[in-house]
Amino acid sequence: GPYKNLVASRDLERFVASAPTVYRNYYDQGDAKAEQRGSEIRVSLVGIPATYRSIAIEYGVMGYFRCGLHRVTGQVATMAAKRGFSRGDDDVLYHFRLPRI
């Protein structure tokens, strides 16, 4: 697919930095942000109008990101929802933790 080189590079920093671009390729409302701090990666979805907020977007984006982490690192990340449309929040924030860097 279009992200084959990204996955093949096994470059975690590049993968995390790609989150906003990947999000914008599929959605035209709101933004995705991602940052890495050691073995923890935080991904958020912000600025999505209320009429477009759905658990399908939340779960789809975060599931895609977790799968991408696995493909890039070969590790299974734990995932914790801190905020989300599924909880009635206006934005989404997930923390992913890799077993090792």
Image (tube, rainbow, N blue to C red):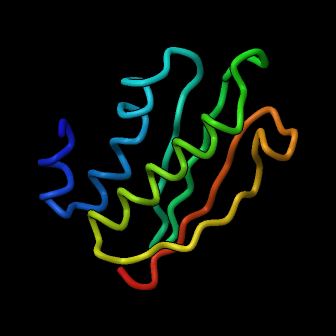
Q: How many marks?
A: 0
Give x and y (percent) for residue 96: 55, 65
**Residue that extends furthest to the right in the rendered view of this protein:** 88
x%, y% of residue 92? 69, 42
Left or right for 81, reference 97? right
Answer with left or right where residue 9 lies relative to residue 37: left
Residue at horizontal 40%, vertical 84%?
100
**Looking at the rendering, which quadrant does residue 60 occupy?**
top right
- Seen at 18% across and 40% down, the residue is 1
Q: What residue appears at the point 63 percent right and 36 percent down from the top-left corner?
A: 56
Compared with 53, 101 (above or below) is below
Q: Residue furthest bottom?
A: 100
Is 54 rendered above or below residue 96? above
Answer with the quarter of the image where residue 8 lies.
Answer: bottom left
- Relative placement, left or right, of 18 versus 95 is left
Q: Point out residue 9 in the picture as x, y percentages from the top left corner.
A: 13, 58
Viewer-side residue, 34 vs 99: 99
The residue furthest front is 56
- Look at the image and tell me in which quarter the C terminus lies: bottom left
Q: Position of residue 71 (x, y in %)?
A: 28, 64
Quadrant of res 48: top right
Answer with left or right where residue 5 lies relative to residue 34: left
